[in-house]
Structures are given as C-alpha cells and as structure tokens.
Amino acid sequence: MKTLDIDQIQKILIHRYPFLLVDRVIDLEPGKKGTGIKNVTINEGFFQGHFPEEPIMPGVLIIEAMAQVAAIVVGSEFRGKEAKPEERMGYLAAVKEIKFKRPVRPGDRLEISVEIIQKLANLFKVRGEARVDREICAQGELVFTKGTT
C-alpha cells in the first residue's frame, strides 16, 4: 500500500486550485488501483450556487474527482522528470453508466476508489466508486486515454 500527499499528487496531476479535487491518496497500486480522499468543505466555491439553501456537491464534480483519482492511478507509473505531462496524464474519454445514490454535503469525507478493469493500447477502462461513511454516493465506469495519440 502506497500513500501520496498533496505535493506528490501535484507531480502526477496537472490540475490546480480550484479544480484539484483530490487531497490525499491513501492506497495506491500504480497502474492498477487506488483510493483517494476529497475533504468537502462549505468553503468550496460551487456551494454558493449549488444550492444556497441546501448545499450539495455537483454530480459532475464527483465524477471529476473520480476521474482525477483514476488519472493518478494511470499516471503514477510515469513519475520521472523525463516524462512529459501528457505522457503521464490520463485523459477522460468517456463516462459510462454513472449512478448517484446519495448527495455529498459540506463536512463529508469523500473516499474515491478506482480500479483499472481493462487495458487496450492507450485506452483504460476504470471502475470507480465514491463513498461517504462507507455508503456509496456514486459508482460507474470511466474510459481514459493515456499520453499522446
């Protein structure tokens, strides 16, 4: 089991504030699977409009957090300085059958687990699941392409 702090995450992902949605990786098998954490706070800018009276994290951002954890898993094999960002990044190509089971609210600790279930050349099919307190919030499949084509 390998863990990554925010500095290590930023060496893999090119995302930065306000769009970096992974605070820590608590379990990583490079190129295979991983689990990341997003600490959801009321200070997130999207809560101002989604929704002022009942703040919930937008589903598309839950998918993006899932995609970022998947990109870490895909890109974690290419940590060296010699690798260009586009060679170590996974790019989201498709979102398949994402289902939302419960809302994510301020104060929640979103735990995102992903696993590569299929590799074909530069394409990666990933199964993802987001949970709060062991309860599934969202689950589905993502497809990534790695590096340049």
Image: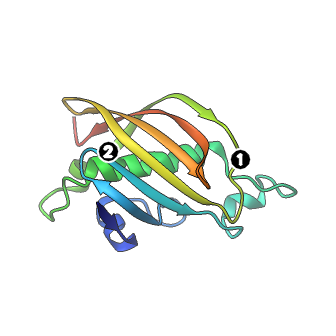
Q: Quadrant of residue 53?
A: bottom right
The structure residue drawn at horizontal position 68% and vertical position 52%, both measured from the top left corner, is: 104
* Image location (x, y in percent) of residue 4: 34, 67
Quickly name the residue at label 2.
90
In the rendered structure, the answer to whether residue 77 lies left or right of residue 64 reads: left
Residue 60, horizontal then vertical, whole percent: 60, 43
Q: Residue furthest right?
A: 53
- Residue 72, position as x, y percentages in the image: 33, 53
Can you say whether 114 is above or below 52 in the image? above
| Left or right, residue 17 beside residue 2 | right
Q: Residue furthest front?
A: 134
Could you tell me which residue is drawn at 35 percent across and 66 percent down?
10
Amino acid tagged 2? Gly
Quadrant of the snapshot with the N terminus: bottom left
| Mark 1, residue position | 103
How packed is label 2: few (under 14 Cα within 10 Å), some, or many (20 or more)?
Answer: many
Q: Hey, what amino acid is under mark 1?
A: Pro
Q: Judge whether 47 appears above or below 123 on screen.
A: below
Circle 1 Cα neighbour tier, 10 Å, few/some/many (<14 / 14–19 / ≥20): some
Q: Residue at x 23, y 43 (%)?
A: 147
Q: How much space separates mark 2 and mark 1, taking CA atoms?
A: 27 Å
* Quadrant of the image occupied by residue 47: bottom right
Left or right of 31 on screen, residue 21:
right
Residue at image position (21%, 49%) is: 87
